[in-house]
Every structure is written in structure tokens, then in C-alpha cells.
Image (spheres, helix red, strand yellow):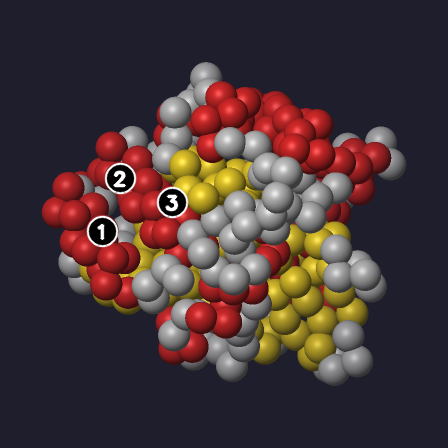
Amino acid sequence: MARRRGLVINDEQMQMIDAVLSKLQRVAGSTFVALISTSGQPITTAPPDVDADTLSLAALAAGSFAATRQLAEVLKEREFTLLFHEGRESNLHVVQVTEQILLLITFGHDTQVGRVRLYTSRAVEVLKPIFEDAEEDHGGEQVIDRDYSREAGTAIDDWFPRTE
Amino acid sequence: MALINLAAREINYKIVYYGCGLCGKTTNIQYIHRRVNPGARGRLVSIATEEERTLYFDFLPLSLGTVKGLRTRFHLYTVPGQSFYNASRKLVLQGVDGVVFVADSQISRLDENVDSYLNLWDNLRSQSEDPGNLGIVLQMNKRDLSSIFSVADLTELLNHTGSPVIEACALTGVGVFETLKTVCKQVIAKSSRS
């Protein structure tokens, strides 16, 4: 059975990722952009202090994208490569970067969709090799070591309320 | 393994509550949401039908705080238990680090429990998940009811991996946090070894 692929993002990779997101947000006229994992976990946003519940956003966007892929399969379409939600005041555009990564872009109606799609596509080209490298899982085992495991175990015992 | 963001000093683990329809998966999550410190949890998101049956998933993010300089989070999900929602269950299982299999202890629910248990392993295998890398806990729910299986019988039926077994009554909270603690510790231990 295949070993599960992890995702470990180091400082250098995150600096490159944040630079790409920051530029994308600016040139595409986006309200904010976010990177999440296909399993529903948030990674980073631009700007960093987004006024949104990013945890819920990540879980719901990943679920929505996963469902869209399954819809494509049911309809015998090779794939729906993007997901677009049009709202009254803002829109959400979701594209896949790698097998494990999704890019979310929100923007208002004063921004043209074509512009967003163009710059998003360029950003994906830059982000893809960075995440493919991160998916090789360099250094994860050095972070979650026995000390971490032991301290986390104690924190779990202390943190959750007593069972009734 | 978990999503590790070294730059943000953050680790996220995904835990999925699995089991047949009406076994108590959502009840577990709702109890945790009610009882846990509000500062350490996010919003409980439920995608449910009008009859409050889970349609896609429930989602509850929990923050353990900072451990060795790393902010540690557990993202709890449930799957829809009804058999015809298997496509949704597969999607929710993507990237899972730990599974709580919630068994309905009632003798009358044997077939549903077995179907769900077999379905879990089919879905994990179809995603090339190595169960050896996952934290797995068997929660025997509804222990307060009459006409229930013994712990030994349910263990024989639904625990071929020899995973930890917790007796519970999710409605009143018995065993809910014990289950959560056990699976959280398991996923951390597994990720430190993988």
C-alpha cells in the first residue's frame, strides 16, 4: 500500500508562497486569496489578517471542490478544473494547484473574471513546483518527534474537560 | 501525515467520526462543541438535511494550544452515515489522520454497523491509505440502552485492528472526551513515527 504523502512547508517555501499570493491579490484586484489543502485545512492568506472564518472557509471550499470533481465523474466529464461562485457583492473562484492544494480567490463585481482567471493561472504555474517539493515531506519527522508527542499528550490530558 | 506549516509554526490533524446512520457521530461533535472552552474551538459547521440528518459533513476545529512552539489543531469531521451517501464519505476521508468508528451498541443495529465498518475499510483502501498510519478508536455508543451487545462481542465484530475501545453514551457525554483524547494522542503518536 502506498505511503501517505504529507505536506511540510518550510520558511523559505512560505516566503515564496506569500510573495506569489500577495502579488496575485494585488494584480487580480482580489479581496483576498487563500491557499488550503484538499483535505480542508487552511495554509495561508493574502492579506494575512483576513476578516473571515478561514477554518470554516477551508473546510467548506475543499468539500465543495471535491463534490464538483465527483460531479464531473458522474457526468462523464474529464474534469471541472475550476469552481466559481457568484454572489451579490463578491465572487469566489477556486482552482486546483496540485493534488493536495487549492487556491481560493475572492473578488468584487468591479473586477473582471477574465483578469482573475488569467493571473490565477500564472500564479498556479509558480506555486505548483513549490508545493510539489513540500509534498515530498522534508523535515516533518524532525518536528513531530518524541518530545513533541509526549508534551502534546500531556496538553491533551490537561486541556479537555473531565469525562462525565 | 498531518499538514505542517513550519513557517507559521502550525500543525493540523484531521479526525473523522465514522459509523452507520443515527449511531451518534453528530451527537459526539455537538457535545464537544457545547462543553469545550469557547476560546479553543471554532464554529460548528453542519451540512445537514431539513430533518437534521448529516448530508455531507459536520466540521468542528479545535485548538490544543502551543506545544513545543507549534500551534496544534484538530479538525473534527463526521460523515453522513446513511448507506447511499458513500461518495460523500469518500470525500470527507481525504487526508484523514485519525478515525473514530462510532458503533451503535444495540443488537438490532448489527447489520448497519457491519456494513459501515466494511465500508470504512473499503474506502480507506480505495484511497491507498495505509491504516497502519492512522489513529483508530472504536467507540461503543448507546451503552445506556437495553438490548445491547457485550463489549467482547462488539470488539470481536468491529475491531480487527485491536484498536482502543471506549464505551460511551454521547447524549450525556459519557466517554465522549475519553474517545477524543485517545484518538488525538494516537494521531500524534502515529505522525511522529511515520
**Quarter of the image where one finds residue A110:** bottom right
Residue A101 in the image: above or below residue B152: below
Residue B97 location, quadrant: top left
Do marks 1 and 3 share a chain?
A: no
- Amino acid on which the number 1 mark rests in the picture: Gly
Residue named by callout 1: A153
Disc 2 and disc 3 on one polypeptide chain: yes
For badge 2, the amino acid type reads Ala
Q: Position of residue A10 (x, y in %)?
A: 28, 51
Q: Which residue is mark 2?
A: B189
Confirm or deny contact between disc 1 and disc 2 (CB under 8 A).
yes
* Label 1 packing within 10 angstroms: few (<14), some (14-19), many (20+): many
Residue type of the residue flagged with mark 3: Val
Q: Foreground: A69 or B121?
A: B121
For image coordinates 15% across by 41% down, the residue present is A146
- Quarter of the figure that contains the C terminus of chain B: top left
Tag 2 and tag 3, C-beta contact below 8 Å: no
Structural distance between the alpha carbons of marks 1 and 2: 9 Å
User: In the current view of this chain or complex, which residue is farthest to the front?
Assistant: B146
Query: Which of the pair B194/B174 is nearer the observer?
Result: B174
Q: Which residue is drawn at the image coordinates 71% and 34% (left, top)?
A: B108
Q: Chain of mark 1?
A: A
Q: CA distance from mark 1 to mark 3?
A: 11 Å
The residue sitting at 62% across, 44% down in the picture is B146
Q: Chain of mark 2?
A: B
Q: Do callouts 1 and 3 mark residues in contact (Cβ within 8 Å)? A: no
Kindly identify which numbered label has been placed on residue B183: 3
Quadrant where the N terminus of chain B is found in the figure: top left
Residue at disc 2, secondary structure = helix
